[in-house]
Structure formats: structure tokens, C-alpha cells
Image: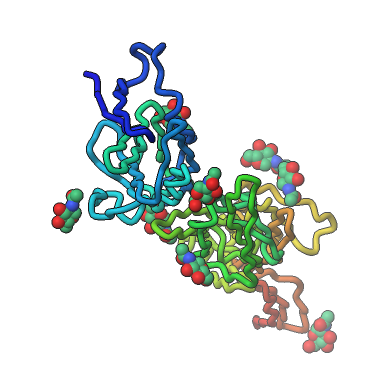
């Protein structure tokens, strides 16, 4: 299937060019050297724009007037995507997005694509028409690749430290000046300062960058932070989950209540626990922190502050005796600080057999001194008997 197209040269002779629609077969014939088109295949991200520089030549001796029409069409389809005249012939899918920007009579076939769509991917060819002088540069097919629009990147991605101001940066995918993006941020964290700027590379592509200053707090730990880049036709975003490190805040609870101990009362300041002698005591220490804190228990007022044997913050003592009475402190520590809470432990004794300490025998009466222990108060009283 050969196309035979009449071509009118300057001198009015009709010359027939044999054009092969596809390269490859009979490659030795090549295109007519005088009809030459130079354009580089391009890759454009979906939603963005691209300018495709292109020049072409016509054979020496032929000229192009300002009446020449340049047409870009999809290869192997009748779809005209851009034309230097007659916008009506441009197919609906590309209307307003593909623009022939070059001055065709100057041999400039540059065109631009804005808001690129995945369907734009494919091969295109250029064609000129001026009266009966028509030529398709079908040998010089132009490949347009449409890639997915990359997400912006947020840095740094590491852990933040509560109370320490930090600058986070969102960097958009480079885009031509004509379709550069705007960066916006979303998230729970309060943005104290925002600085948007651009960096232009040698190819003229603009990278939009946004720096924000935030002072993270424990409240924002595990909350998302989103950076959205809005281009003229599309937007893309990327999210990170904030990891905020903070010192521990410790609380004590009584896990077995109310079975044992008998009475307990915990506030943010600590606990007061009453335990019946002979039963066991359990206290659970837990810390809200990032990274996880080391927990240790110690009994106050002891000569040694050796930590008590506890695992995962749970202190078990039992069965308790009067010796276990006292103040127990749990300490939680991570690299950002420490925090303590304490529990006052009171041992409740069942009323005991009275202890006769001594008796005073005066005449026929005996007066004895008794001790009775309840709670940890000593009750002393005298009792007397007569005989
Ligand atoms: C377009 O994509 C094809 C494969 O899909 C690849 O071979 C070619 O190199 C790409 N061209 C450009 C300009 O990126
Ligand atoms: C473009 O769309 C309009 C309205 O939807 C329709 O009338 C016209 O025929 C379409 N043109 C082409 C080339 O598809
Ligand atoms: C072709 O036209 C484009 C768009 O107007 C322009 O940017 C480019 O410089 C021109 N190229 C030449 C070689 O004149
Ligand atoms: C980007 O922001 C500027 C200034 O805020 C605005 O003029 C422009 O229209 C925005 N562009 C897009 C694509 O949203
Ligand atoms: C981010 O983009 C996704 C689609 O890629 C969308 O579903 C989501 O709503 C966007 N998030 C924000 C905060 O814009
Ligand atoms: C701590 O408890 C574990 C298990 O209950 C035990 O093996 C270990 O010997 C105890 N250590 C001390 C110092 O009491
Ligand atoms: C926590 O305990 C581990 C093991 O005992 C120790 O290596 C680490 O240094 C401790 N961390 C802090 C903050 O005390
Ligand atoms: C014993 O009782 C007598 C008479 O009531 C009193 O004078 C004496 O001081 C008592 N002795 C003691 C040790 O309390």
C-alpha cells in the first residue's frame, strides 16, 4: 500500500513522491531527504504539560507561505490533534490541550500539550498543506509517552521530637514553567511558618518546594500530614504519619481490684492502697511514651534503692506483712526524660489477740496493760480484774 502524492514544486512541475507509510520495509529508500522533520520523543506526566520543539524542512526550491497549514495528527488514525488553522477539524479529545505553537511558514512545527491524558500516549505525525502542496512527515513519527503523575515527597521522614521545632519539606515533581504546581499542606499539626519557593533546572523545569516549620507534640503522634500539589488539571498528594518522640508520663493502677487489695484510690498524683495482711498486692505501672520507657519499682526510704523485681511494670508482693507497708515508686525512663508516680501501701491487720504487756498487782486487784493492733495504730488500754 503505497501512497502516491502529487507535489508541486516551485516551478510548477508535478513530481510524484513514493511514500512508504511505515519505516522498516525497504529502509534503503528512506524519506525524501529534503522533507525532514526534527522532533524529540517526549515523556509527560499525566495532568502536566510539555512543549515539544520541532522543526521541519521542505525541499530546496519549494517555499512555504503564511497560508500553509500545519497539522499534527495521530499516526494511523484520522484524528487531527492540533492545526495551525481551522480549529474545527481538531478532534474533541485534544481540543484546547494540544496547540501548534510554532510558526509553520518558518518551518517550525513545535507544539505543546497541556493537562496530558493517558489517552494522549502514542505516535504523532506532522503534515503540511498549502493548496495542492501536501506532505505527511510519516517517517518522522513522534512518540509521546504519558506517565503517571508522581507524588510529591516529604522529608525528613524520621521521628520528630516533641517540643523541638523542625522544618519539613515537600518537593513536587518537576514541571514546565507553564504548568507548575502549588503546594498545600493538610494535617492536625499547627504550621507555624510556611515558605514556598521554586528551583529551576537547566532544562527549564520548575520544582515547587514548600518548607514548613512545626513544633510537634505528643498529641500529633501517629497523625497524618499530607502534602498536596495542585497543577492546573490535576492534583496529587503524599502523606506521612508523624512519629513524635516524647518523654514518659507514668500512671499506677491496681490490676486486681477490688478482689485485692481491699481499698484503693488512684489519682494522677498516685495511689493509696490498703491491703489486708496475708493477701497479695499487685500494682501496675504503665507509661505513655515514645519510644517505650523502661519501668522500674523501688520502695522509698529503704537504705538501698535497689529496684524491686518487676516485669512489664507489674509489681507483685505477697503475701504481705507489716514490713511491706510504705511508699512504692515507679519510675519510667526513656531517652527523652523520666517520670515517677508512687503508691502508699497500708497493711490492714485483722484485730489481734490482746497482748498483756504487764500487770500491776496492787492488793487484791490486778491491773494489766494491753496492746491491740488494728490498722497500724496501737491501741493501749488498761483493764482490771478483781478477785
Ligand atoms: C516511551 O515508552 C516506551 C515504552 O513504553 C519506551 O520504550 C520509550 O523509551 C519511552 N520514550 C520516552 C521518550 O520516554
Ligand atoms: C465534538 O463534540 C461536539 C459536541 O459534543 C460534537 O457535536 C462534534 O461532532 C464533536 N466533534 C468531533 C470531531 O468528534
Ligand atoms: C519554534 O516555536 C516555538 C514556539 O513559539 C519557539 O519556542 C521556538 O524557539 C521556535 N523554534 C525555532 C527553531 O525557531
Ligand atoms: C497557585 O497559587 C497562585 C498564588 O496563590 C495562584 O495565583 C495560582 O492560580 C495557583 N495555581 C494553581 C494551579 O492552583
Ligand atoms: C490524596 O490522593 C488520593 C488519591 O490519590 C485521594 O483519594 C485522597 O483523598 C487525597 N488526599 C487528600 C488529603 O487530598
Ligand atoms: C525476679 O523474678 C524472676 C521471675 O519471677 C526470677 O527468676 C528472678 O530470680 C527474680 N530476681 C530477683 C532479683 O529476685
Ligand atoms: C532500658 O533498659 C535497657 C535494658 O536494660 C537498657 O539497655 C537501656 O539503656 C534502658 N534505657 C533507658 C533510657 O534507661
Ligand atoms: C501500780 O499501781 C499502783 C497503784 O495503782 C501505782 O501506784 C503504781 O505506780 C503502778 N505501777 C506501775 C508500774 O504502773
The reply to whether residue 374 is visible in this rendering is no
- 294 shown above or below 220: above
What residue appears at the point 71 percent right and 56 percent down from the top-left corner?
Answer: 333
Q: Is residue 85 left or right of residue 114?
A: left
- 373 shown above or below 338: below
Q: Is residue 311 left or right of residue 123?
A: right
Depth check: 164 or 177 in front? 177
Residue 73 at what x, y percent from top left? 31, 40
Hey, which quadrant is residue 70 in on the image? Answer: top left
The reply to whether residue 94 is visible in this rendering is yes
Quadrant that contains the C terminus: bottom right
In the rendered view, how is the structure colored?
Answer: rainbow
What residue appears at the point 59 percent right and 53 percent down from the top-left corner?
Answer: 207
Hey, which quadrant is residue 34 in on the image? Answer: top left
What residue appears at the point 72 percent right and 81 percent down from the top-left corner?
Answer: 367
What residue appears at the point 61 percent right and 45 percent down from the top-left corner?
Answer: 203
Residue 290 at what x, y percent from top left? 63, 55
Residue 281 at what x, y percent from top left? 58, 57
Depth check: 209 or 12 in front? 12
Quadrant that contains the N terminus: top left
- 175 shown above or below 387: above
Q: Residue furthest right?
A: 303
Q: Is residue 184 left or right of residue 76?
A: right
Depth check: 131 or 73 in front? 131
Depth check: 340 or 54 in front? 54
Q: Residue furthest front?
A: 11
Residue 361 at what x, y percent from top left? 77, 79
Amino acid at each position: 500500500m503505497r501512497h502516491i502524492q502529487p507535489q508541486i514544486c516551485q516551478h510548477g512541475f508535478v513530481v510524484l513522491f513514493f511514500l512508504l507509510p511505515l519505516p522498516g520495509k525497504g529502509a534503503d529508500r528512506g524519506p525524501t531527504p529534503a522533507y525532514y522533520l526534527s522532533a524529540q520523543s517526549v515523556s509527560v506526566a499525566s495532568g502536566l504539560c510539555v512543549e515539544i520543539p520541532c522543526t521541519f524542512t521542505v525541499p530546496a526550491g519549494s517555499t512555504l507561505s503564511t497560508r500553509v497549514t500545519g497539522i499534527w495528527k495521530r499516526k494511523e488514525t484520522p484524528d487531527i490533534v492540533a492545526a495551525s488553522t481551522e480549529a474545527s477539524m481538531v478532534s474533541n479529545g485534544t481540543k484546547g490541550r494540544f496547540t501548534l505553537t510554532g510558526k509553520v511558514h518558518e518551518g517550525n512545527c513545535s507544539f505543546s500539550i497541556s493537562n496530558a491524558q493517558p489517552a494522549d500516549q502514542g505516535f504523532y505525525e506532522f503534515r503540511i498543506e498549502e493548496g495542492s502542496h501536501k506532505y505527511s512527515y510519516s517517517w518522522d513519527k513522534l512518540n509521546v509517552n504519558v506517565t503517571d503523575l508522581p507524588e510529591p515527597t516529604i522529608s525528613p521522614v524520621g521521628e520528630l521530637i516533641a517540643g523541638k521545632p523542625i522544618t519539613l519539606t515537600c518537593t513536587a515533581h518537576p514541571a514546565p514553567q507553564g504548568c507548575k504546581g502549588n503546594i498545600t499542606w493538610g494535617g492536625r499539626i499547627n504550621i507555624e511558618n510556611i515558605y514556598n519557593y521554586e528551583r529551576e533546572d537547566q532544562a527549564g523545569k520548575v520544582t515547587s518546594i514548600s518548607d514548613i516549620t512545626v513544633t510537634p507534640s505528643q498529641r500529633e503522634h501517629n497523625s497524618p500530614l499530607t502534602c498536596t500539589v495542585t497543577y492546573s488539571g490535576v492534583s496529587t498528594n503524599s502523606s506521612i504519619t508523624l512519629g513524635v518522640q516524647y518523654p514518659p508520663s507514668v500512671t499506677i493502677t491496681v490490676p486486681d481490684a477490688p478482689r485485692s487489695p481491699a481499698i484503693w484510690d488512684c489519682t494522677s498524683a498516685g495511689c493509696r492502697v490498703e491491703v489486708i495482711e496475708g493477701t497479695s498486692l499487685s500494682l501496675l505501672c504503665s507509661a505513655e511514651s515514645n519510644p517505650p520507657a523502661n519501668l522500674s519499682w523501688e520502695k522509698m526510704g529503704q537504705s538501698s534503692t535497689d529496684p524491686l523485681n518487676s516485669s512489664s511494670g507489674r509489681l507483685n508482693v505477697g503475701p504481705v506483712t507489716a514490713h511491706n507497708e510504705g511508699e512504692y515508686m515507679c519510675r519510667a525512663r526513656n531517652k527523652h526524660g523520666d517520670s515517677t508516680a508512687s503508691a502508699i501501701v497500708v497493711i490492714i491487720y485483722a484485730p489481734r489477740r490482746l497482748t498483756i504487756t504487764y500487770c500491776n498487782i496492787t492488793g487484791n486487784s490486778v491491773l494489766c496493760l494491753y496492746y491491740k493492733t488494728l490498722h497500724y495504730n496501737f491501741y493501749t488500754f488498761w483493764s482490771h480484774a478483781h478477785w
